[in-house]
Image (tube, grey):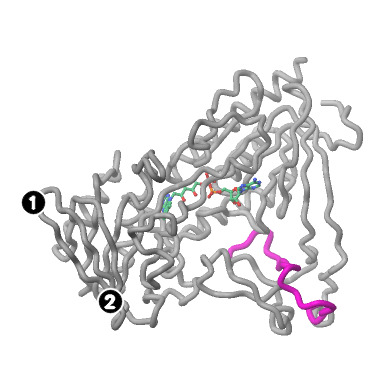
């Protein structure tokens, strides 16, 4: 492909989003011979999978899968990774797009060895978004334990004015506080959008008490509380007092399948809660657990996972929507009231900790409007020869193995756009 947009760098495919879908699409296309740019908004690849403590159904940690993908990226000269980067515009005809990418300064270069001298002297802090705000990091921070690229980043909004303590502490001269933002333009035949999902804002579900009651948490917070590199170093305790919970309830469809919130099924939350039951059972063999659900949806082989987890006699499955959640001010316990549809009675359960299985919201809002989305914001994947393709959870809610298959299909569509463009 020739470089006609002024100053544009010539590549074949651009992938937006460096989660499991984006990494897979980039790797599969590059291993088939494409030159790929992978654009990730945050300072590290990995996406939401990096936040998980374990994967269902095998319950293995996510690190091995991520590390294999990182290695495939590291060793493939055909992939350019841009972190802290976002696509600003896509212009031009199909097969010859000019894609403009804004790259924020990281202020730390790749001579960083992760020695840890800089956070030790940094006087400023910021909320740790990777850990759902359950802890804070220094203004100079490692995005997470398995960050790729494995170097620190600086959140300049958190820095104290005139402070250069990290620069003075770094003996590798890896810190450049004056690094400017950059804009780069790529000429490509196709673009894969793999921008993934965010959890539904639980504070909007008024009757479930999130944000008002400290011991009501979301399923993503639960992943971080269970993780050994998380805010409690894997001690699964309740936020208000650090106590070990003896009674825990899960509320399924927290926001999903609800016309006032997300009318669709978020697909993965039932299996995610069952997985989180195993975290609790491993740490607290005596814990009593209740799951409030509308329907349990565990398609395919996940049905075996459902059967195995719920064979436990100390798990109560309650088919019914939760009407309200109140806090006992003295103990900070939660009192959950629901309608049990099997017995047609109103029931209450008092628990130490309540986990909301919040749904999946597609992250298509920041994408250029070249990508068509449906009424919920999911990308409608009809590239119709445009070479603009969606992949992963921004297309529909899906678990990791389905995401990987979807992203491989997106890489193939991207490859087709490259071939079409080469043929003119
Ligand atoms: C509570 C919970 C637990 C789960 N547990 C499991 C499990 O155990 N097993 C399993 O198989 N699945 C699980 N899932 C599903 C799993 O999280 C998804 O399948 C997976 O994250 C989908 O990957 P993705 O790449 O599509 O999206 P993401 O993981 O969301 O990655 C998207 C990436 O795109 C980046 N991005 C977003 N917008 C932009 C932009 N405008 N520009 C550049 N970059 C951008 C993001 O920063 C992110 O890195 C779980 C889901 C939930 C809700």
Q: Comparing marks 2 and 1, which lies closer to the viewer? A: 2
Answer with the quarter of the image where residue 94 lies: top right
State which tag comes first along the sequence, 2 or 1: 2
Q: Residue at x 74, y 20 (%)?
A: 421
Residue at label 1? 343
Q: Position of residue 149 (x, y in %)?
A: 69, 59
Residue situated in front as seen by the camera: 50 or 209: 209
Query: Where's the N terminus, which quadrant?
Result: top right
Q: Residue at x 51, y 51 (%)?
A: 198
Specify whether 120 is left or right of 265: right
Residue 156 lies within the magenta run: yes
Residue 147 lies within the magenta run: yes
Residue situated in front as seen by the camera: 221 or 415: 221
Q: Residue at x 63, y 41 (%)?
A: 27
Range covered by the magenta-colored residues: 145-166
Specify whether 250 is left or right of 129: left
Residue situated in front as seen by the camera: 28 or 309: 309
Q: Residue at x 35, y 43 (%)?
A: 258
Label 1 Cα crowd, 10 Å radius (few <14 / some 14-19 / many 20+) = few
Residue at label 2? 328
């Amino acid at each position: 492909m020739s470089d006609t947009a002024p100053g544009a760098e010539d590549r074949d495919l651009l992938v937006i989003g460096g989660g499991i879908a984006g990494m897979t699409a980039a790797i599969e296309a590059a291993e088939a011979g494409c030159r790929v740019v992978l654009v990730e908004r945050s300072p590290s690849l990995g996406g939401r999978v990096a936040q998980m403590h374990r994967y269902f159904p095998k319950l293995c940690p996510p690190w091995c899968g991520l590390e294999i993908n990182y290695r495939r990226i590291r060793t493939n000269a055909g992939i350019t990774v841009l972190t802290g980067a976002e696509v600003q515009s896509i212009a031009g005809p199909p097969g010859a797009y000019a894609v403009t990418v804004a790259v924020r300064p990281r202020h730390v270069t790749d001579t960083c060895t992760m020695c840890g001298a800089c956070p030790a002297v940094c006087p400023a802090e910021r909320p740790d978004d990777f850990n759902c705000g359950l802890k804070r990091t220094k203004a100079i921070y490692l995005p997470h334990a398995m960050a790729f690229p494995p170097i620190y980043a600086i959140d300049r909004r958190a820095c104290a004015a005139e402070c250069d303590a990290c620069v003075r502490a770094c003996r590798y001269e890896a810190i450049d506080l004056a690094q400017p933002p950059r804009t780069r333009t790529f000429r490509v035949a196709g673009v894969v959008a793999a921008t993934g999902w965010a959890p539904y804002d639980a504070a909007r579900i008024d009757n479930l008490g999130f944000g008002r009651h400290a011991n009501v948490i979301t399923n993503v917070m639960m992943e971080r509380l269970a993780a050994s590199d998380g805010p409690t170093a894997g001690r699964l305790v309740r936020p208000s007092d650090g106590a070990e919970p003896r009674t825990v309830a899960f509320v399924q469809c927290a926001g999903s399948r609800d016309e006032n919130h997300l009318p669709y099924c978020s697909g993965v939350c039932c299996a995610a809660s069952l997985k989180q039951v195993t975290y609790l059972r491993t740490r607290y063999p005596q814990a009593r657990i209740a799951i409030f659900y509308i329907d349990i949806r565990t398609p395919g082989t996940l049905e075996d996972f459902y059967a195995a987890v719920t064979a436990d006699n100390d798990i109560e499955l309650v088919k019914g929507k939760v009407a309200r959640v109140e806090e006992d001010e003295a103990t900070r316990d939660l009192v959950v009231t629901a309608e049990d549809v099997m017995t047609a009675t109103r029931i209450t359960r008092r628990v130490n900790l309540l986990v909301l299985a919040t749904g999946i919201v597609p992250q298509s809002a920041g994408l250029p409007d070249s990508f068509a989305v449906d009424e919920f914001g999911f990308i409608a994947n009809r590239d119709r020869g445009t070479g603009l393709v969606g992949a992963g959870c921004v297309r529909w809610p899906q678990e990791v193995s389905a995401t990987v298959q979807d992203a491989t299909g997106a890489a193939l569509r991207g490859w087709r756009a490259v071939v079409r463009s080469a043929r003119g």
